[in-house]
Image: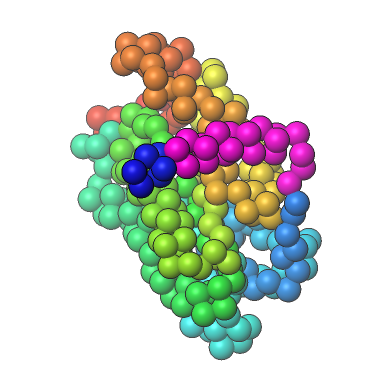
Amino acid sequence: MNIVLDILLLLLTIVYSYLESLVKLFIPQRRKSVAGEIVLITGAGHGIGRLTAHEFAKRQSRLVLWDINKVKKEVGDVTIVVNNAGAIYPADLLSTKDEEIAKTFEVNILGHFWITKALLPSMMKRNHGHVVTVASLCGHGVIPYLIPYCSSKFAAVGFHRALTLELQALGKTGIKTSCLCPVFVNTGFTKNPSTRLWPVLETEKVARSLIDGILTNKKMIFVPSYIGICLILEKFLPERALAAINRVQDIQFEAVVGHKIKMK
């Protein structure tokens, strides 16, 4: 009998969740204040990290740009961490050097573990904080000649989702989590990116979307926002249709293929 009641409650919760999401489309989300919060941003010297730091600075946050040990001594406990540092080496698998594969995972996912483990205890003690994972659309779908990058971003999305669930299981609901997943961003790390279906984003737009998502405690931040809907639709498409979509969108960028640089 209990299982029947649990299933009924689950169905009601699903219906309520859909209605709640529909209402939120038309009602502006309340934004929290980050004034006085101590914010650590990795990779803050360039691109998304640099502009995100500017956005926090405009909101009177106290910014920390690296060195965890000195941070704790000089400014106190970090309450918001933005794991933004990233590495990418566009190439086919056989042309990708072993050290490039290792570096990709060290920066794009292992760094998230070490930084979060160092900063999370003080957040958990106060039940207050925000852990931001900068991933990519490549954490949900794959692109040729970016195997290490896509793999590391899948891991980053998994890190975010698992951490979110674990904090809920531990009752630390005061610690929020967000994951940023943009399409191609014009940061200069990927040379000459282009695609027919998605825009190549400027860092200013991505940073504004990220800060907006943080202030509204949004779990998954897709840029542009409609990408999330497209990913849901893709789950219901047959393989042939997905292959046709990939051909139409014609993603291109400079990559080392067969030890030669090609536009792919």
Q: Is residue 93 magenta?
A: no
Residue at x-position 23% and y-position 50% = 98
Along the horizontal axis of the image, is 52 left or right of 87? right
The dominant secondary structure in magenta is helix
Question: In the rendered image of this protein, does residue 206 appear above or below residue 37?
Answer: above
Q: Position of residue 143 (x, y in %)?
A: 37, 30
Residue 130: x and y, percent? 57, 63
> Is residue 14 rendered magenta in the image?
yes
Is 117 on the left-hand or right-hand side of 198?
left
Q: Quadrant of the C terminus?
A: top left
Relative image position of residue 66 (x, y in whole percent):
54, 71
x 60%, y 83%: residue:
76
Residue 111 occupies quadrant: bottom left
Observer able to see residue 76: yes
Could you tell me if residue 119 is visible in this image? no
Q: Nearer the viewer, residue 156 or 123?
A: 123
Question: Along the line of sight, which residue is nearer the eye, 116 or 200?
Answer: 116
Tell me the residue at 39%/54% (across/down): 162
Residue at 33 percent across and 29 percent down: it is: 144
Whole-percent x and y of residue 11?
47, 35
Q: Nearer the viewer, residue 117 or 3?
A: 3
Left/right placement of residue 148 relative to residue 235 reads: left
Q: Among all residues in the image, which is located at the extreme bottom? A: 73
Q: Quadrant of the N terminus?
A: top left
In the image, the segment drawn in magenta is: 8-29
* Residue at the extreme front: 1
Q: Along the line of sight, which residue is nearer the eye, 236 or 38? A: 236
